[in-house]
Structure formats: C-alpha cells, structure tokens
Amino acid sequence: MTIVHLSLSNSSDLPFEWGWLKLNATIVYTWVVMALLVGVSMLVTRNLRPDVPPNRWRSTLEIIVKLIEDQVTEVSHLAVRPVTYFAGTLFLFIAVSNVLLIVPGFRPPTGSLSTTVALTLSVLVAVPLFSISHGGVRHYLRQFIEPTAWLLPFNILSEFSKAISLSIRLYGNVMSGAVIVAILLSVAPFFFPVVMEMLGLITGMIQAYIFAVLAAVYISSAMSDKQKAIKTRKRHE
Amino acid sequence: MSIDWITVAAQLVNFLLLIYLLKRFLYRPILDGIDAREAEIAKRMADATQARIIAEAAENNYKKLQAKHLAEQDTLLEQALEKTEAQRAQLLAETRAQLVQEQKDWQTYLEQERLDFIKRLQNAGAATLFALTRKAVHDLADEPLEHTIIRHVGKKLAPLEHTLVAAAGEHTSATVSTHHALPESVQAQLTQELNTLIPNVALSFTVHAEQAPGLVVQVGGVRVEWTIDSYMEEFEALLAENTSAVQLGHQGVSGQSHARKQPGSEHEH
C-alpha cells in the first residue's frame, strides 16, 4: 500500500478503500500537513538545551511560537498557555495547509468543508471547556442570560452562527481561490494563475490568522467578563 | 459542497492529535526553552548586577584604602621629614658643639703649647742668663758664682740675727740646700759665718737639682732663701711681657686683616 499510487481527492472522493478502511484525500493531506509540522518540530527541538545557543531553525520556530503567544495574549488579555496551544495549532495547521497550495498536486485539507466544520466544532467545544475550566459551569451558563434572560435564544443562536461563519468563511476563501485558479488556467494558462497563486498564499495566511484570532477571541470572551468580551470582540471584528 | 461526518470526526481526532503532538514537540520545548533562557538571562543579569555592586563596593573600599594609605604615607613622610629635620638639627648642634669643643681644645692646646714654649723659653733664658752670669763672675773674679753668693750671704743674714736665733730656739741643727754640691771649704766658711749668728747649731748640706742656684737655709720654722729666683722671676716677667706684646701685635694685625675682609664678605652675599 503506497500513497503514491492513490488518486487523491476531497472528502467527496473515495480514492482509497481497503476492506473496511476508507481514506479520502482530505484525511491523507491532513496527515501530510501533520507529519510536516510534527516532523519539523521534532527535528528542531530534539536536542533543545538551555545552555546551548539556539540555531537558526530553532530561532525561527521561537519567533513563530512567540509571535503566536504574543498575539493570543494581546487578543485575549490572558496569558493562558492552553489557549496558545489551541489557537496556535489552528493557525499553523491552516497556514501550512494553505501555503502548500503552491505544491503541484497538493489539495489543501482546509478546502474541504468537512475539515472546516471539524475545526469549527473544535472551537465550539473548546469555548465552553475553557470557560468552564476557568470560571466554572455557572460562569459559562450565566453568559447566555446576560444582560437579560430574554436574550437566551439569541445568545444560543449567536453561538451557532459563530460556528457557521467560521467554517463557511474558511471553506469559502480556500475553495474560491482554488476555483478562481482553475478558471484562470482555462482562460490564461500562463500569467494569471501565478498571480492568483501568490494572492492565494497571502489570502491563506490571512485566513489562518483570522480563524486563529477569532477562536482566541471567542475563548477569551467566554473566559473573561461579558462586557469586557463584547468590547474585545468589537475591537477585533 | 457536502459534509462527510466521518471525515469531520476523523479531522477532529486529527486536530486534537495535532494539538497534543505540537504541544509535546513544539510549544512546550520552545516556550520552556525561552522561559529557561529568560530565567538564565535574568539570573545572569542579577549576578552581573550583584557582581557590579560587589565590584563597586570593592572599588570604593579600594579607593578608601588607597586614600588611607596615601594619607598614612603623607603622615609617615611628614614624620620622617620631621624626624630627619630633628636629627639633622641635632647632628648640626652636635657638630657645632663638637667643633666648638675642638676649637676650645685646640685653643687650649695652643695655649698650653704657648705656655710650654714660654716656660721652655724662660728656662732656657734663665739657664743662659745664669750660665752667662756664672761665666762672667768666673772670668772676672776667678771664683764660682756659688762661692760669691755664699760669701756674701753672711752680710745679708746679719740683719736677721734675732729672727734666726728665735727660730732656732732649741734646735741644734739647720739645713742648707743648694743646686750644686758645695766644696768643703765653702761649707766650712758658711758654717763658720752662720755659727757666729746662731751658735751651737750644726749645719747639714743637701743638694736639690730642681732648686734655683743659690742656697736655702732652713732653721726651725724659718726659711731663708738666697737664690737667683727673684732675678729669674723678673726675667720671666720681662720675657712674658715682651712675648705678650708680640702676641698682641700679631692679634692686632690679624684682627685688622679680618676687619678688612668683612666688607668684602658682605658684598659677596
């Protein structure tokens, strides 16, 4: 069994089927991104010691991780490392997936609605978990009846709208880029696809940043005071 | 655009697994490394600050010690200078005193030499005078000077007869001492002349080389001298007067020359 002979496609495709095991292109490319991230991290941090001066790879990773931590701390006003792990993983996964769009034959898993829904569901689960772990169940449930109990349905609807907007935004941007590239390839196969690929890189990085920052905002707003969270959300949206 | 919920579940698991793996291999090593490095840097800065404080304290202490040592050095130098100055003054005083003493000794020595020279000169002069007198008497009168003196002493002792008799009292002997031994004829003549004045007194003759020429008669508690000492004393007085005049003349010349030198020495200053 080698992946090389597979015809990869999105989750709607069934490129590989071995008995009960069915793998689609989204999962395989997700594993590729995961292997790339974890492999690079393991290679760089395998001989990490405080008394050894950092090399350029370690310095690069330190810059990235510190940038993520600073951004999360700046957005959430909370120096909670689990939030950094969560939002940072979202950013790195989405960013690497989108950057690998330039690799011929690679289909970013973020272009699959199943992936964006999964990421959105993880955010929706993470928000109450972080809120409950930080302030307790009552603190989390109280947020749905603030500022008044009459807003309970709207608050619940707001939570679901968050999930829908997150997932559709990411999926739409990535898929739209791919669709535009495909259309331009048929119209002008030499020049415009290159420009669109470059724009796609920028858009992919921006989408990764937006998704991670919004996740951090949602989590931090659920962990902090409601009024303060509203102000923070307005400022970032 | 469709949602495969199995894929969604698989992606959820993949994402949670990715979170764990990145936390395990990326975030914690990197952030812990950064924290450890920050702590190490903070520790080194604190150590450096502490070391700087210690160094500044040591520098201040060193400066204080240096200032103290300089002050002590100045004090010791001043004390040494004062001690040296005192020793110098003492040595100068001792040297001056020694010079004064040596000058005094030298002057004493010179005075003694002068006196000795005068004494020798007097003795030589007296001896020469006595020899000349003896020679003149011998040449002119053909007899020794002592005989002439003794022959003449009888006339000189006659006015002293009562004094000599009273002095002889119960004594039965008298002593005659001379510079040279007297011939027996002269002794007999002198015995005869004295017995006419103080009878029953036996004379004994003795010789004293240090005695002046002439004779000395000792009768009881009376001593009669008939020598050339008075002439010699007069000669010595005259000689001393003449030598003093010569010495004063020399001193006057040297004092004038010294007085003439004074203005020149003042101009030299």
Image: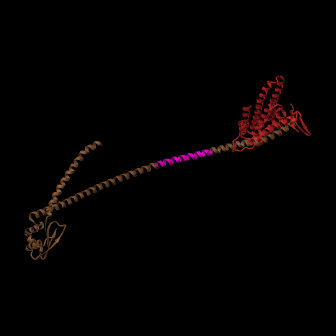
Residue, far right: A19
Examine the structure image and report whether residue B14 is included in the region drawn in magenta. Answer: no
Q: Position of residue B28 (x, y in %)?
A: 74, 43
Q: What range of the chain is rendered magenta?
A: B46-71
**Is residue B66 rendered to the left or right of residue B136?**
right
Residue at position x 41%, y 50% in the image: B81
Vertical side of A108 occupied by B253: above or below: below
Q: Position of residue B200 (x, y in %)?
A: 10, 77
What hue does chain A carry in this figure? red
**Is residue A81 rendered to the left or right of residue A176?**
left
Q: Position of residue A188 (x, y in %)?
A: 82, 23
Examine the structure image and report whether residue B53 is included in the region drawn in magenta. Answer: yes
* Residue toward you, A56 or A173: A56
Tell me the quarter of the image containing the N terminus of chain A: top right
Q: Is residue B209 visible?
A: yes
Residue at position x 47%, y 48% in the image: B70
Residue at position x 90%, y 37% in the image: A17
Tell me the quarter of the image containing the C terminus of chain A: top right
**Is residue B225 rendered to the left or right of residue A59?**
left
**Is residue B59 rendered to the left or right of residue A98?**
left
| Colour mapping used in the image | by chain
Our reading of the magenta stretch's main secondary structure is helix
* Residue toward you, A86 or A64: A64
What hue does chain B carry in this figure? brown
* Residue toward you, B213 or B67: B213
Q: Quadrant of residue A53?
A: top right
Q: Is residue A128 visible?
A: no
